Amino acid sequence: MRISALALAAIAGVASTSNASVTFDFTITADNHYAIYSPTGVGTNVSFVGENEATFDGNPGLYNWSLPEQWSAVSPNGVMYIAGWSDDFLFQGVLAQVFANGSPIHTGDARWEVTPTNLDLDDLDSSPSVGQMATLIASANTNSTWEPTFVGGNNGVAPWGFIPGITQEAKWVWWARPGSSDPLTGDTNAGEFLIFRLTIPTPASAALLALGGLVMARRRR
């Protein structure tokens, strides 16, 4: 089968973007805690990006979720990970305004996924180590335990009110254990801490999809 010049151009595009990366810009808060991790490009290994306060109080802010933090991280494969955990009391959730290479992927977007770890973290606990995160991410990939997040109300909903610096389009998210109708407002410490995953196609992946379409079109002629 002969490949058209257009398909050859697509192949060249894949080659030129094979090392393309994605920059994620976060404005994020959590009730109660989060930690962000970026892939290193080697298997499921990750590097630590940042976290919020380990205490119940905010710094600044009345509570640890009162004011968001801002982080920027580069992903070599269009994926980012966030660990999230609560104080096992009444309310919990993650709220984030995120842009990937300038395109919105705020919490509530269908590209957010979550997996429980069946491990518990609480106030004052250290964030998961990069080795622990790599092991748990590999397990979630192998066992296909990633699932859509539970999506709650927009930024501004009770009991948190409006979090400044985060778009109102962002929604509070969490993981819903079986039988839980609203894990954001109930006691749902089972499965915590959680790992959230954000995924967007890299330029190389998009080029490969385009190339596949060109080849299929060529075969139909």
Image: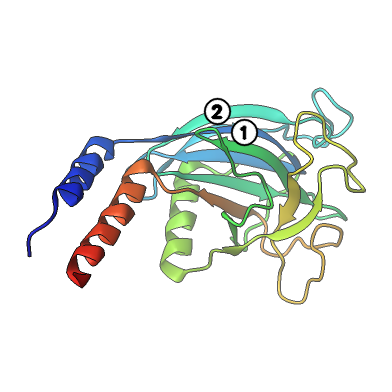
Q: Which label was assigned to residue 26?
A: 1
Q: Residue at x 82, y 65 (%)?
A: 182
Residue 163 pos. (x, y %): 83, 35
Residue 75 pos. (x, y %): 43, 37
Q: Residue at x 69, y 52 (%)?
A: 108
Q: Nearer the viewer, residue 14 or 157?
A: 14
Query: From what the image shows, is residue 50 above or below residue 84?
Result: above
- Snapshot quadrant of residue 117: bottom right
| Residue that badge 2 annotates | 72
Q: Residue at x 71, y 75 (%)?
A: 178
Residue 148 pos. (x, y %): 62, 63
Q: Earlier in the sequence, mark 2 or mark 1?
A: 1
> Is residue 48 toward the left or the right of residue 174 in the image?
left
**Amino acid identity at mark 1:** Phe
Label 2 neighbourhood size at 10 Å, few (<14), some (14-19), many (20+)? some
> Is residue 22 toward the left or the right of residue 64 in the image?
left
**Amino acid identity at mark 2:** Ser
Residue 126 appears in the picture as rendered = no
Q: Nearer the viewer, residue 32 or 204?
A: 204
Q: Residue furthest left?
A: 1
